[in-house]
Amino acid sequence: MITITINSSEKKIDKEISLSDLLKELGYDKEWMGVAINGDFIPKSKHPQTIIKDQDEIEVLSPVSGG
Amino acid sequence: MENSMKNMQNLKIGDKELKSRLFIGSALYPSPAIIMDAIKASGAEVVTVSLRRQGVNKDAGESFWNLIKSLDLNILPNTAGCHSAKEAITIAQMSREIFGTNWIKLEVIGDQYNLQPDPYETLEAAKVLIKDGFEVFPYTTDDLVVAKRLVDAGCRILMPWGSPIGSGKGLANPDNLKAIREAFDDVVLVVDAGIGKPSHAIEAMELGYDAVLINSAVALSQEPIKMAQAFAKAIEGGRIGYEAGFMQQRELASPSTPTVGTPFWHQVS
């Protein structure tokens, strides 16, 4: 069992999975979303080979208005 | 008769040529419909957007992005809310992937009270991003030395503040802005933040600034669509005036009507 946070919400997952699979499970596998793990941007091309680790802090962002 | 109306010069940014010198923000409008109508009314060809945490409503980001994409304008993503170079770099990289542009409005805040940009973190982020192929539009103060450091780092655009973000106070230090203009002939200068009314935008253009970025002044006006038009006209007027060249100021009055043949004239003894 590993514990991660996604946009500051804690989540427990029972096995190691790839970032792609995690995003798919959460419905966050969209082209207009961007992901960072522990503050580092992870480009979409690297999602399949990125394995989620215990205590990872994941940020999923999407477009909003801005000035 | 030939139409002798003169247009203002186009603004060149990298390989893009823009007819409008108004950059517009997409935030704070009363409704999505008004965002669209106000942006169209402004004639702007550059619109700013941002990134935030994906919320419960998974479709919100998509619908906003589709709305903005449908305008077919140049997208200028910002790094608003970042407090360190590292955060800003991460947001810039993410923005490039999502919005499909290497343009980034680099905004690293150093003080929460007046949202003053942090020059040290901004400079550090600018160096990394330029090396990584970004066209960096750094939000900065009107400090000439900070401007110099940013240009030395490779910035071809600077966005000094007029006054703090959202204050609507106009150009707090026109002399400082003027010094930056005089120092950098070939840098694109955009006044970003603090513009509250069209006369402020005219003042910026008359100082020789290349463009103005406006958001709150339009979005928070009583009639955003009308205000967007007012800014478009003001910016065009200010720019054409600047291109036409101003008269020299004089210490004393000087009559504009010919003095020869003045009626009822008498020699003053």
Image (cartoon, coloured by chain):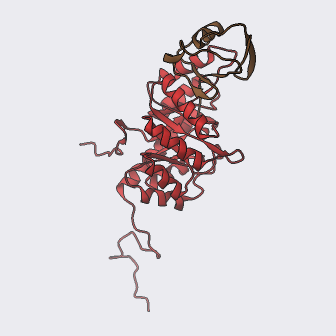
Chain colours: A brown, B red
Left or right of residue B115, residue B17 in this image: left
Q: Looking at the image, which residue is at 53% across and 13% down?
A: A49
Quadrant of the drawing holding the N terminus of chain B: top left
Q: Quadrant of residue B101?
A: top left
- Can residue B192 be seen in the rendering of this structure? no
Residue B175 coordinates in the image, percent (x, y): 53, 62
Left or right of residue B145, residue B5 in this image: left
- Can residue A38 be seen in the rendering of this structure? yes
Q: Looking at the image, which residue is at 64% across and 32% down?
A: B28
User: In the displayed structure, would residue B115 be above or below residue B54?
Assistant: below
Q: Looking at the image, which residue is at 64% across and 14% down?
A: B58
Quadrant of the drawing holding the C terminus of chain B: bottom left
Residue B244 coordinates in the image, percent (x, y): 35, 55
What is the residue that sits farthest to the bottom in this orientation? B269
Count of numbered badges drawn on the protein:
0
User: In the displayed structure, would residue B48 be above or below residue B109?
Assistant: above
Residue B222 coordinates in the image, percent (x, y): 64, 36
Q: Decide which of B124, B164 is in the foreground and name it.
A: B124
Q: Decide which of B56, B43 is in the foreground and name it.
A: B56
Q: Decide which of A5, B173 is in the foreground and name it.
A: A5
Residue B134 coordinates in the image, percent (x, y): 44, 35
